[in-house]
Image (spheres, rainbow, N blue to C red):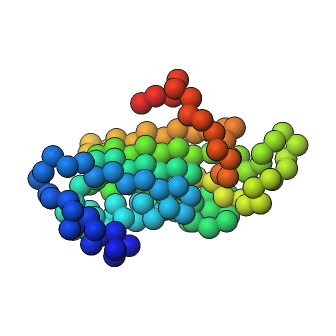
Amino acid sequence: MSKAIDFIRANYEIGSNDKLVIYGYSWGGDNAVELAQTLDKVGINVNYLFTIDAAKGPVSGGLGLDLVDREIPSNVEKNINFYQTNFFSNNKGENRSGIFSRGNPNVAQDPTKTTIFNSKWNQAFHSYNRQYNSKNSY
């Protein structure tokens, strides 16, 4: 995390027209939220935070265990969050991914400053690549 903060401080000028975009998938989604929270503490705004099936370990988000902080800090302008709700890869209940991990909806710490776009994918799977459907635009 400290390397990411150092890189942003060295390359991002507060008040400039630069856009700061953070992206994270799975455990990286959890890290992306933590990075945005850390940047909030040092006064750096995030234009876009993409979280894709943010999870923290192999059972995160499932089995009643959501270990990810889903509250997006007020320094984030927009959070686009894609998550799936299904552990299994077919209607037979077979878990082909070998994990029980999934994301969940995010919430804004301050809805007047942060826009959250939660997109739930019923037929997507944590370890399954699926092409984005253009009907779900934001």
Q: As drawn, is 41 to the left or to the right of 28?
A: left
Q: Residue furthest right?
A: 92
The quadrant in which the N terminus is found is bottom left
**Above-or-below relation of 118 to 71:** above
Which residue lies at the image location 43% right of the left edge and 53% below the top edge? 23
Q: Quadrant of residue 90?
A: top right
Which residue lies at the image location 33% right of the left edge and 51% below the top edge? 21
Q: As drawn, is 38 to the left or to the right of 66?
A: left
Q: Position of residue 69 (x, y in %)?
A: 47, 62
Q: Position of residue 46 (x, y in %)?
A: 28, 53
Q: Position of residue 52 (x, y in %)?
A: 52, 50
Q: Is residue 107 visible?
A: no
**Above-or-below relation of 26 to 129:** below
Q: As drawn, is 105 to the left or to the right of 62?
A: left
Which residue lies at the image location 58% right of the left edge and 39% below the top edge? 120
The quadrant in which the C terminus is found is top left
Which residue lies at the image location 43% right of the left edge and 39% below the top edge? 117
